[in-house]
Amino acid sequence: MYNKRSFYLAALLFFAFGINLQAQKASAEEQQILQGLDDKMEEYAGMAKAIWDVSELGFLEDKSTAILQNKLKEAGFKVESGLAGMPTSFVGSWGSGKPVIGLLAEFDALPGMSQAAVPYKEARPEVNAGHACGHHLFGAGSVAAAIAIKEWLEKTGASGTVRLYGTPAEEGGGGKVYMVREGLFDDVDAVLTWHPSQMNESSAESSLAVVGARFRFYGIASHAAASPWNGRSALDGVEAMNNMVNMMREHVPAETRIHYAIFRGGEAPNVVPAYAESSYYVRHPNAATLKDIFARVVKAAEGAALGTGTKMEYELEMGYYEVLPNEPLSELMYDKLKKVGGVKYTPEERAFATEIMKTYDHGKMTPETAMEIAPYTVNYVGTFASSDVGDISWVTPTASLGAATWVPGTSAHSWQAVAAGGTSIGAKGMMVAAKTIALSAVEIYKNPSIADQAMKKFKSLTGEDFKYESLVGDRKPPLDYRTN
């Protein structure tokens, strides 16, 4: 879900502002860390591919979470699972004392995205889902970074704790929200995370806060020709709500995004629908403003029910804060990303990239764009997407990077993303992220003042009186949201 830029914005950055093509020189200690990760690349790529193979949906990631947890246990981490009411969640910890650095791992796939690892559209008959957002790489890459950090802490005897948070169901289930609400991040000094992408970048950027809800309308069934006057159409309620919300678009802040889908609209045209259901996402760069806009959407639903003689109930399914940027941490990660460098293709990988780029508009990008690193930017206004990482960023300083796990120009949530993610192209991008996070964490352990600066910036943005309150209130995790 979290693709921070369209490739059009990426192209603007690449060709208007210039690119860092050369990785900066790493220290001897950093080179050892990078080499250690290179030595295990095949192992971590195999983990990612195993998760890609099973492509499990949110809160149903039993095999995927086991793969990640088992690897951490083998490396000596203490692993606790089934946290915050979610069976597939976990936290793996190693070390003691401060600073406490948290890493994130996602591992859920998207429904209806079955695709083979080929540069043309071809479904895999054994699965109906696919890793169109690259979470198989996200999970395996973060585990790789966590183990590299653990090995450095063990070797040097430095003070510090590394934690790997296994966060289920990012795609609409919002697993991180429930872990934040449970207080699992309260003692963390910094969170370093990443996301698969079609580019290499690390900037201080916000996102859109989002609220998602299911609206259910209940009417009265009747014969649509013989006695329609006896019926009350639940579908009329859904459509009336949609009409009112669409008229409301003119009267909300311009940055607002509202989108919906009708899940149920009746069973037969000659029966007045007794039940109809729609799902809404409402987004805005500011969570406080978003609450007011969503309240108006609910009023539209209530009015629709009143006008159509139906009954309406709604269920708040998810709610994410916007990401709160943290410049000290983002600058650190950008510096380390430049030392790691981008993704260089083999001739075979370049041939794959060239072929798949024929299937979408990639602008001026070429396969070599994967080697490049986008310029550092700061943006406190939400971009085009939402993520449950936002909630974490409001309880502890958080920074993220994107790594070129997909061929340049690829859109997230596409079959092209699934295809590249199942190849060595995805694995190489994953290791760029693992290396960058590992170097960044080590730098914080060596210089704890970085964490202090990050916390100071964090508090200056939240304010001393800020108290986190989840946008989903006290509802339990929607463990069946992919099955109902």
Image (spheres, grey):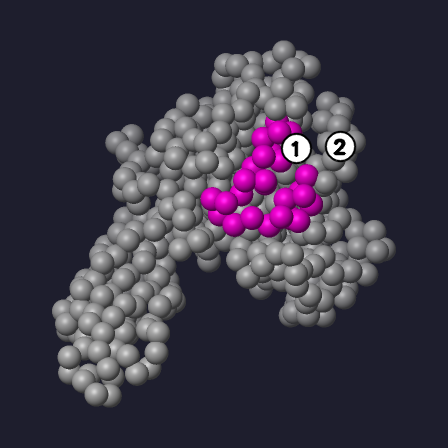
Q: Nearer the viewer, residue 194 or 84?
A: 84
For mark 1, what is the residue? 144
Quadrant of image for the C terminus: bottom left
For residue 254, side relative to residue 69 (left or right) = left
Q: Could you tell me which residue is drawn at 19 percent across and 83 percent down?
A: 228
What SS does tag 1 mark? helix
Q: Quadrant of residue 107?
A: top right
Can residue 205 be seen here? no
Can residue 151 be seen here? yes
Crowding at dot 1, Cα within 10 Å, few <14 / some 14-19 / many 20+, comes out as many
Q: Which amino acid type is marked by label 1?
A: Ala
Marks 1 and 2 close (CB-CB < 8 Å): yes
The span shown in magenta is: 47-72
Q: Position of residue 56 (x, y in %)?
A: 56, 48
What SS does tag 2 mark? loop
Residue 57 on the magenta span: yes
- Eyeballing the image, is 247 above or below 324? below
Q: Nearer the viewer, residue 312 or 354?
A: 312
Residue 419 on the magenta span: no
Q: Nearer the viewer, residue 105 or 362?
A: 105
- Eyeballing the image, is 322 above or below 39? below
For mark 2, what is the residue? 40
Q: Position of residue 457 (x, y in %)?
A: 41, 33
Q: Earlier in the sequence, mark 1 or mark 2?
A: 2
Q: Position of residue 271 (x, y in %)?
A: 28, 79
Q: Could you tell me which residue is drawn at 14 percent across and 69 percent down?
A: 306
Q: Could you tell me which residue is drawn at 64 percent across and 38 percent down?
A: 141
Q: Which amino acid type is marked by label 2?
A: Lys
- Eyeballing the image, is 44 above or below 303? above
Q: Position of residue 78 (x, y in %)?
A: 55, 20
Q: Could you tell me which residue is drawn at 67 percent across and 52 percent down?
A: 421
